[in-house]
Amino acid sequence: MQFGHLELFLVRDGTFRLDGGAMFGQVPKTMWELEMRPDRKNRVRVGLNCLLIQTPTMNILVDTGAGSKQAEKYKDAYGLNGNKLLKGLKKLELTARDID
């Protein structure tokens, strides 16, 4: 997407899982599970999406994803399937060093 001299890109870092009840609050499970099937722990999959803003002189990354240094207990608790940000940047012909 382009706005004047700015270009915006969605860069995916993977997915994680959150409790469906916490995610949808007062919405009954019978309604939200029609759109998002929960797993056996009642968690729904959510995308880890980062925003890359390119100006003529800078690359700005808003949110850097989950990274690769999460403890195993967090990876299991949140069904973390991340650490794909560098691959996403590579598709845009960028590396981590290109981020300002």
Image (cartoon, helix red, strand yellow):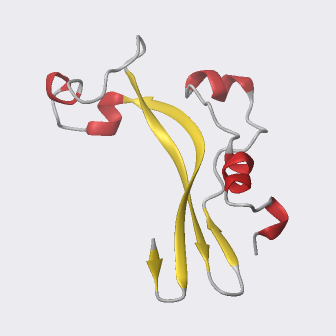
Q: Residue at x 17, y 35 (%)?
A: 27
**52 sits left or right of 21 in the view:** right
The quadrant holding residue 44 is top left
Q: Residue at x 25, y 38 (%)?
A: 25
Q: Nearer the viewer, residue 79 or 22?
A: 79
Instruction: Give percent across and percent down for residue 88.
Output: 66, 50
* Residue 4 to residue 40: above or below: below
* Residue 92 to residue 80: above or below: below
**67 sits left or right of 49 in the view:** right
Q: Residue at x 65, y 27 (%)?
A: 75
**62 sits left or right of 99 in the view:** left
Q: Nearer the viewer, residue 70 or 61?
A: 61
Instruction: Give percent across and percent down for residue 50.
Output: 57, 56
The quadrant holding residue 72 is top right
Instruction: Give percent across and percent down for residue 60.
Output: 66, 73
Q: Nearer the viewer, residue 10 or 65?
A: 10
* Residue 60 to residue 83: above or below: below
Numbered-mark total:
0
* Residue 31 to residue 52: above or below: above
Q: Quadrant of the C terminus?
A: bottom right
Q: Quadrant of the N terminus?
A: bottom left
Q: Residue at x 31, y 21 (%)?
A: 37
**97 sits left or right of 67 in the view:** right
Furthest residue to the right? 97
Furthest residue to the top? 40
